[in-house]
Image: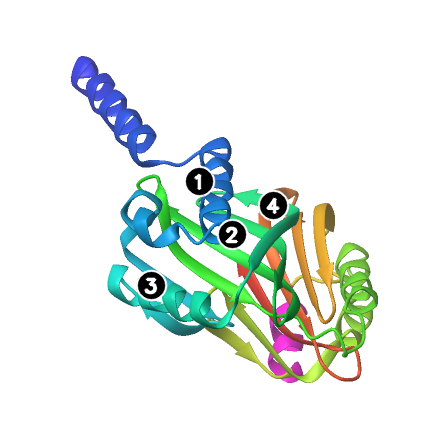
Amino acid sequence: MIKRTILLVCCLFFTVSLFATNDKEKTTLIDAKNKLINSKGIIEKLEDTFHKKVTLYNDEQEVAKGYDAIAAYYINKFSSEYEVNTVLSDRISFKSFQIDRERVITSEGTLDRVALYQFKKGKIFKIWFLSPNLSKPNAVPAVNELARGYRDSNLNDFMDALAPYIIECDFPGRCNVAGKRDMRERYQQYLGKHTTSYRVVKRIAIGDLVIDDNYISLYLKESRNIAIYQTDNKGKIKRIEFLGF
């Protein structure tokens, strides 16, 4: 019985190791993908770079799925843009995800965006392009206020950072809470009653978008997650999405 258990654990470990993509592999693959896009060579290397069920989203709206649709997407891009240069400026790796802050330079202008990649079996499985609004108030003050309220277990300070129509979701788009009333009911269960902490390891902040790689603790148990915040025209947080919970 013991030998069978050991064998089962070893097989499970081997299976996970076989299909998992480590941070170095993720970085190498994305960097290679960007070089291929910059040189317009991505079409010939689709199967080397992408999972066969790869899906591309713009701000969580599906744009293309599968090799044929992805190829058509890039062909259209290359036909309208004479030159493409994707430059990495920051990066967060987390579980099967990698989040890159990118500056995309084309003949039509320069675009600052966040690319969120998910990997499966050593290839790019999903890509979400998140386009921050640079004309809206900077999101950092509101996120810092919310984090301070959470860290101090102060429900009122926490709620002050939120817009009336706040939505809280599990990424991508599985929303659990809508509106400040529901948020207050959700968080008053433990803010002010238990020791909490919010520790930022790394942050990507651009326009109305903040992405925190952080450790949050509740009941003395600390867990790592990615929090994606977006603010409204008044600088209040209107949407929170979590990776990791």
Q: Nearer the viewer, mark 2 or mark 1?
A: 2
Residue pictured at 54% horizontal, 58% vertical: 115
Q: Amino acid at mark 4?
A: Ile
Give the alpha-carbon distance from disc 2 to disc 1, as whole Å. Answer: 14 Å
Residue at numbered disc 2: 38
Mark 1 or 3 closer to N-term?
1
Residue 214 lies, with reference to residue 143, above or below; the image says above
Please tell me in which quadrant of the rendered image residue 1 appears: top left
Q: Which residues are magenta?
A: 180-189
Give the alpha-carbon distance from disc 2 to disc 4, as whole Å. Answer: 22 Å
Residue at numbered disc 1: 29
Give the alpha-carbon distance from disc 4 to disc 3, as whole Å. Answer: 24 Å
Mark 2 or 3 closer to N-term?
2
Residue 232 is one of the magenta-drawn residues:
no
Residue pictured at 47% horizontal, 53% vertical: 37
Q: Nearer the viewer, mark 2 or mark 3?
A: 2
Residue at numbered disc 3: 70
Residue 17 in the figure: left or right of residue 178: left
Q: Amino acid at mark 1?
A: Leu
In percent of width and height, residue 214 lies at 66, 48
